[in-house]
Image (cartoon, grey):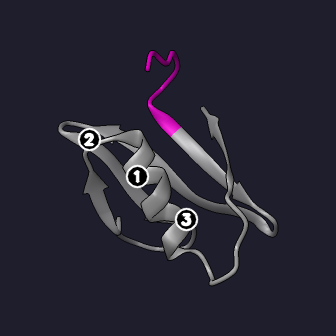
Amino acid sequence: MTDSGSGVWVAHGATGVAGIIRAVDGGYSVTIAGADEAVGTYPTMDVAKAALHSAMPPGSDWPRFEQH
């Protein structure tokens, strides 16, 4: 996967921003909206997206990811 931009992706859910994924050394760091700390760092973007979605409230639709 080749991306241009800053290495920051914002996840948008039904009620607004759900979280942020940042490219870091060794993977992708996931932070849920409103949290002070990341929930973890994951080896691939697909795993990071799944982790962010799993941290959203039960029954949440898959968020829309936008690179910034």
> How dense is the environment of label 1, judged by Cα within 10 Å: few (below 14), some, or many (20 and up)?
many
Q: Nearer the viewer, residue 4 or 59?
A: 59
Which residue lies under the disc numbered 3?
Answer: 53
Q: Is 5 within the magenta?
A: yes
Circle 3/circle 1 CB separation < 8 Å:
no
Mark 2 and mark 1 in contact (Cβ < 8 Å)?
Answer: yes
Magenta portion: prevailing SS class? loop
For label 2, count other residues whose C-alpha is less than 10 Å away and answer few (under 14), some (14-19) or many (20+): some
Q: What percent of the width, then of the height, locates residue 1?
A: 43, 20
Tell me: 41 left or right of 52: left
Query: Looking at numbered disc 3 in the image, what kind of residue is underneath it?
Result: His
Closer to the camera in the image, 64 or 23: 64
Magenta-colored span: 1-8
Mark before the other along the chain sequence, 2 or 3:
2
How far is disc 1 from disc 2 in space, using C-alphas? 9 Å
Residue at image point 44% right, 30% down: 7
Q: Is residue 50 magenta?
A: no
Q: Label 1 belongs to which residue?
A: 48
Q: Is residue 24 left or right of residue 7?
A: left
Q: Which of the marked residues, 3 or 1, is nearer the chain's N terminus? A: 1
> Compared with residue 51, is residue 66 higher up or lower down, i.e. above or below?
above
When the figure is inspected, residue 46 is found, relative to residue 37, above or below; the finding is: above
Q: Residue at 81% across / 69% down in the picture?
A: 15
Q: Residue furthest right?
A: 14
C-alpha separation, residue under disc 2 versus residue under disc 3: 17 Å
Which quadrant holds residue 22? top left
Which mark is in front, 2 or 3?
3
Three-letter amino acid code of the residue under disc 2:
Gly
Amino acid type of the residue that numbered disc 1 sits on in the rendered structure = Ala
What mark, if any, has residue 27 been given in the picture?
2
Question: Which one is earlier in the sequence, the residue at label 1 or at label 2?
Answer: 2
Helix, strand or loop at mark 3: helix
